[in-house]
């Protein structure tokens, strides 16, 4: 069910962002000044027929084109690049065998770009599908790990006192709901015990009902829906992938720091990680960034994010935050040995971990080798366990052989 969750996150983002399109015709997206930090703007795309916004039903050619320019399709915040981008010097090329493996992976999984960093140096970089070094590509649920990082930053800043705080301290509207007594930590690990149906194919599921709440409540839709859910287990006992809960983390962080996620990301990720390109992050009808989905950055900035995490976050997050965030706080057990879930990061065997999203987006980190592999793709289908496994296998081979 967790794979469907990634698709449902996209469905919610499509609905919310689509509601924000206001400009008539089909010119380039308009940018208007936001009331946030200087340099951050709000992009308003052309008004489009709702049927055009159903990303899951775009053709292969449409995805290859539109994943590079999501700001032309959905409203969001535009965040400028860092004033001092992090240099990514060229390192020695990978072996011919590894390069052949990566090229085959790109062709087999319809990847648009792959970058491999070893010790902060670029050991491999390749592009397809019209993507180039200065183009952005959408992240889908890779954004969850960005939101988790902003939660860590809010703890470092003191805006969030502790992971052990009750969620209701930061989202008071959840008081009296099944989230009463749930901690921030349990929200981050999706172990709240609140019942949730992530079945995107069922029109009566909680995920499908997100659309109805958006229509009825606009920018308050997330909280209004989540506070109506029943409890099915004690907090901390049962793991269930819940798109709505990642979006709640976004609400929690925005409430705690008093600014949109995109603005906070400028100070806590884009600048310290040294992004060379700008960041685009979709917004809902209330102007809030969608915590669980849909930011767009360059391939090299996906890699920079990974290196920033491996480096420990440069004082932006508490000491040891990423070691805990990428660890299996939830162990998936004998049926999936070595796999688990941390604070919005996926734990993999041998101490590696990563962020992943539908259609083949991923940042995979191997701390023991100071290795980052960033992949952006246009899989033929939103989910593909085979393609995901192929990618992890190539990363494991790189980790085992690269010097």
Image (cartoon, helix red, strand yellow):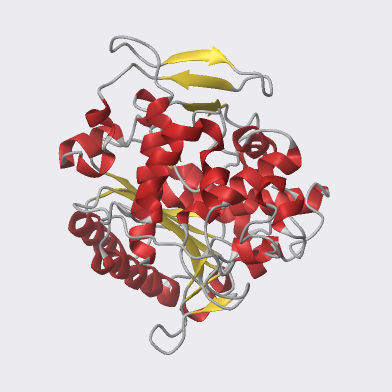
Residue shown at the point (53%, 26%) measured from the top left: 78
Q: List the single residue furthest toward the bottom.
A: 334
Where is residue 381 shown, x and y percent of the image? 21, 54
Nearest the viewer among 337 and 284 is 284
Where is residue 209 shown, x and y percent of the image? 38, 47
Figure disc tally? 0
Nearest the viewer among 9 and 170 is 170
Residue 179 as seen in the image, left or right of residue 42: right
Q: Is residue 43 visible?
A: yes
Residue 353 as seen in the image, left or right of residue 73: right
Residue shown at the point (46%, 77%) measured from the top left: 339
Residue 232 as seen in the image, left or right of residue 325: left
Where is residue 38 shown, x and y percent of the image? 68, 19
Q: Is residue 94 above or below residue 175?
A: below
Nearest the viewer among 191 and 232 is 232
Nearest the viewer among 80 and 178 is 178
Residue 365 as seen in the image, left or right of residue 360: right
Q: Is residue 377 above or below residue 52?
A: below
Q: Quadrant of residue 97?
A: bottom left
Q: Is residue 361 visible?
A: no
**Quadrant in which the N terminus is drawn:** bottom left
Q: Is residue 185 above or below residue 206?
A: below
Q: Is residue 335 above or below residue 313?
A: below
Where is residue 312 shown, x and y percent of the image? 68, 59
Residue shown at the point (38%, 32%) measured from the top left: 135
Residue shown at the point (47%, 20%) measured from the top left: 43
């Amino acid at each position: 069910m967790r794979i469907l969750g990634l698709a449902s996150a996209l469905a919610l983002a499509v609905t919310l962002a689509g509601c924000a399109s206001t400009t008539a015709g089909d010119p380039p997206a308009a940018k208007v000044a936001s009331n946030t930090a200087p340099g951050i703007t709000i992009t308003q795309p052309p008004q489009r027929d709702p049927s055009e916004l159903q990303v899951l039903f775009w053709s292969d050619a449409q995805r290859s084109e539109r994943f590079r320019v999501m700001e032309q399709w959905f409203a969001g915040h535009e965040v400028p690049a860092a004033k001092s981008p992090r240099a990514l010097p060229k390192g020695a090329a990978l072996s011919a065998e590894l390069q052949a493996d990566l090229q085959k992976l790109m062709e087999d999984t319809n990847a648009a770009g792959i970058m491999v960093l070893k010790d902060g140096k670029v050991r491999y970089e390749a592009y397809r599908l019209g993507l180039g070094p200065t183009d952005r590509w959408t992240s889908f649920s890779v954004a969850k790990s960005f939101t988790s990082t902003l939660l860590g930053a809010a703890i470092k800043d003191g805006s969030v006192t502790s992971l052990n705080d009750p969620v209701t301290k930061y989202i008071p509207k959840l008081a009296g709901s099944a989230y009463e007594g749930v901690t921030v930590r349990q929200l981050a690990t999706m172990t709240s015990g609140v019942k949730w149906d992530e079945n995107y194919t069922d029109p009566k599921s909680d995920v499908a009902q997100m659309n109805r709440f958006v229509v009825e409540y606009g920018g308050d839709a997330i909280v209004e829906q989540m506070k109506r859910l029943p409890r099915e287990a004690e907090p901390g006992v049962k793991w269930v992938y819940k798109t709505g809960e990642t979006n709640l983390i976004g609400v929690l962080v925005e409430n705690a720091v008093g600014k949109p996620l995109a603005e906070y990301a400028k100070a806590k990720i884009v600048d310290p990680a040294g992004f060379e390109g700008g960041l685009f992050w979709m917004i809902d009808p209330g102007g809030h960034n969608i915590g669980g989905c849909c930011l767009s950055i360059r391939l090299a900035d996906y890699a920079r994010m990974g290196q920033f995490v491996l480096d420990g976050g440069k004082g932006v997050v508490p000491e040891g935050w990423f070691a805990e965030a990428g660890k299996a706080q939830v162990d998936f057990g004998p049926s999936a040995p070595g796999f688990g879930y941390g604070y919005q990061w996926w734990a993999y065997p041998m101490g590696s971990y990563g962020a992943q999203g539908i259609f083949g987006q991923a940042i995979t980190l191997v701390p023991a080798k100071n290795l980052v592999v960033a992949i952006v793709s246009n899989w033929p289908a939103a989910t593909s366990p085979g393609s995901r496994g192929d990618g992890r296998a190539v990363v494991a081979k790189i980790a085992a052989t690269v010097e």
